[in-house]
């Protein structure tokens, strides 16, 4: 039987298909909780008392889960746009990037990487930031599929950051429930900035992943 390419498969994808894929990305992010529960049972202690090796194992397993989920979700997207952003779009991308860095620095009361470096040390810092890159892979795919779902369902929705709004309503709100209002509000605002960045970068999910990852890390 002939195997269809990614582009051929997505020609028949409906709004519901992409919305389901967006929720799969959200579910993939939530898989970390199951990994955490399993590891806590194996180690017989809470994550607050883990050794450095325990943390590195956790981040490695989580990255593997997120990476596999991301590969599957990438196959459900149409071919990545090849047109580079024009000067106007790059200007707006730079503005969004700057707003994100200023907002993050304000929310963290300092430059995020420097604070995490001092708290984690070099080895844990490296693994933590690799973990961030895989996390943002699923975040970007949630945005991409969410944006497609709303554009297919509602005409004239292409200039509204629907993917970012969906991210704020899922990933963002969950942070309010699990990590408190301050972290949750920060994540909601960042979700909207991420969704806007995706739009100004012409919905190129590869370039967007790189840009959003830097926004999240810095």
Image (cartoon, rainbow, N blue to C red):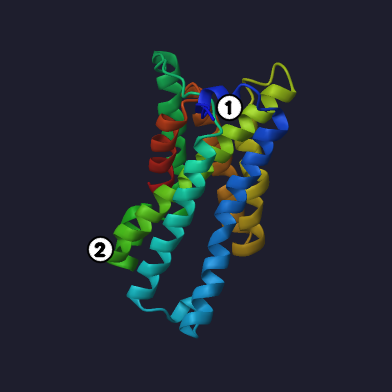
Does residue 135 appear left or right of residue 129 in this picture? right
The spot of residue 100 in percent (x, y) is 46, 40
Q: Which of 22 and 96 lies nearest the eye of the viewer?
A: 22
- Compare marks 2 and 1 and give the one earlier in the sequence: 1
In the figure, 123 relative to 100: above or below? below
Q: Quadrant of residue 149?
A: top right
Q: Estimate the spatial distance between the alpha carbons at disc 2 and disc 1, rounded to whole Å.
A: 43 Å
- Tag count: 2
Residue 215 visible to an observer of this rendering: yes
Q: Are marks 2 and 1 in contact (CB under 8 Å)?
A: no
The spot of residue 161 in percent (x, y) is 61, 29
What's the residue at 38%, 37% (across, down)? 210
The spot of residue 33 in percent (x, y) is 57, 65
Does residue 53 appear left or right of residue 189 in this picture? left
Q: Which of 128 and 4 lies nearest the eye of the viewer?
A: 4
SS state under label 1: helix
Q: Quadrant of residue 11?
A: top right
Residue 98 visible to an observer of this rendering: no
Q: Quadrant of the N terminus?
A: top right
SS state under label 2: helix
Local packing at callout 1 (Cα closer than 10 Å; few below 14, some 14-19, many 20+) is some
Q: Which residue is labeled 2 in the image?
A: 122
Q: Which of 93 and 78 lies nearest the eye of the viewer?
A: 78
From the viewer's perspective, is the residue at label 2 or at label 1 nearer?
Answer: 1
What's the residue at 49%, 21% (across, down)? 202
């Amino acid at each position: 039987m002939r195997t269809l390419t990614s582009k051929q498969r997505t020609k028949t994808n409906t709004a519901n298909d992409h919305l389901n894929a967006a929720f799969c990305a959200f579910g993939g992010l939530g898989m970390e909780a199951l990994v955490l529960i399993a590891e806590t049972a194996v180690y017989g202690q809470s994550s607050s008392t883990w050794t450095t090796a325990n943390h590195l194992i956790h981040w490695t397993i989580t990255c593997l889960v997120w990476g596999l989920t991301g590969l599957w979700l990438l196959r459900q997207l149409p071919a990545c746009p090849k047109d580079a952003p024009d000067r106007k779009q790059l200007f707006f991308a730079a503005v969004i990037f700057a707003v994100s860095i200023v907002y993050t620095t304000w929310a963290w009361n300092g430059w995020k990487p420097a604070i995490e470096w001092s708290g984690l040390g070099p080895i844990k810092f490296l693994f933590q930031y690799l973990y961030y890159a895989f996390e943002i892979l699923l975040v970007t795919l949630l945005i991409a599929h969410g944006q497609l779902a709303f554009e297919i369902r509602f005409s004239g929705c292409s200039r509204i950051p629907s993917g970012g709004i969906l991210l704020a309503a899922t990933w963002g709100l969950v942070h309010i429930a699990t990590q408190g209002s301050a972290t949750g509000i920060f994540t909601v605002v960042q979700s909207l900035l991420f969704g806007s960045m995706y739009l100004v970068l012409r919905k190129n999910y590869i370039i967007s992943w790189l840009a959003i990852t830097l926004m999240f890390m810095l």
